[in-house]
Image: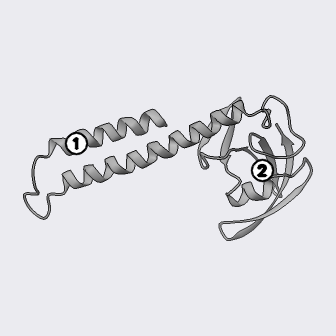
Amino acid sequence: MLARAESDRDFANRESASHKGAMASRYDTFKEEAQAMAAAQEIRIAELRTALDSLRGMLDDPGTKLEQPASRVRLGSIVTIRDTDDHVAYYFIASAGGGETVEVDQRRIVVITPRAPLGAHLVSKEVGDQVEVSIGGRRREFEVVSIE
């Protein structure tokens, strides 16, 4: 994601540089749009670098101990939950990078942070605990099936 954001920023910078001088008319906004896109990509790059540093820090933090299963949901946990319709979902609890999805061992795992509504309700839960959370204005119930 970081490499893609950097590539997009570089493209936007090249696009901006290719439009020389002031606007020829009020409809000539290519240069300004490209500059805005480059600025937005700079923000995205900074966010991704922060997320990457945070995830690397989790690997180095002896308190996280990602190699050992936890009895309670915490940063670094992969949590399997099941809703009342028996739909199973997998979540990775991380300090950054919420909303990203990764495929691991043929499982679609969504990254969520403890600041997200579901993440806040999952932290400190144990296998078998019930979680009730409002998602999209609708109350949903989940059971913690496993914690890795």
Marking on residue 87: 2
What's the amino acid at mark 2?
Answer: His
Identify the image's colour scheme: rainbow, by chain, secondary structure or one colour: one colour
Q: Residue at the location (85% across, 50% down)?
A: 144
- Counting residues from the N terminus, which is met first, the one under dot 2 or under dot 1? 1
The answer to which of 67 and 91 lies nearer the viewer is 67
Residue 46 x %, y % = 47, 44
Q: Residue at the location (77% across, 41% down)?
A: 77
> Up-down: is 132 above or below 51?
below
Q: Residue at the location (42% across, 36% down)?
A: 4
Residue lying farthest to the left in this orientation: 24
Residue 85 lies left or right of residue 110; in this view the side is right
Residue 128 lies left or right of residue 47; in this view the side is right
Residue 112 x %, y % = 67, 49
Residue 63 x %, y % = 80, 37
The tally of labels here is 2
Q: Secondary structure at mark 1?
A: helix
Q: Which residue is mark 1?
A: 15
Q: Residues within 10 Å of mark 1 (few under 14, many from 20)?
A: some
Viewer-nearest of discs 2 and 1: 1
Q: Secondary structure at mark 2?
A: loop
Find the distance from the CA under tag 2 to the CA under tag 1.
45 Å
Q: Quadrant of the C terminus?
A: top right
Q: Residues within 10 Å of mark 2 (few under 14, many from 20)?
A: few
Residue 96 x %, y % = 62, 46
What's the amino acid at mark 1?
Answer: Glu
The answer to which of 46 and 18 lies nearer the viewer is 46
Q: Residue at the location (19% across, 57% down)?
A: 29
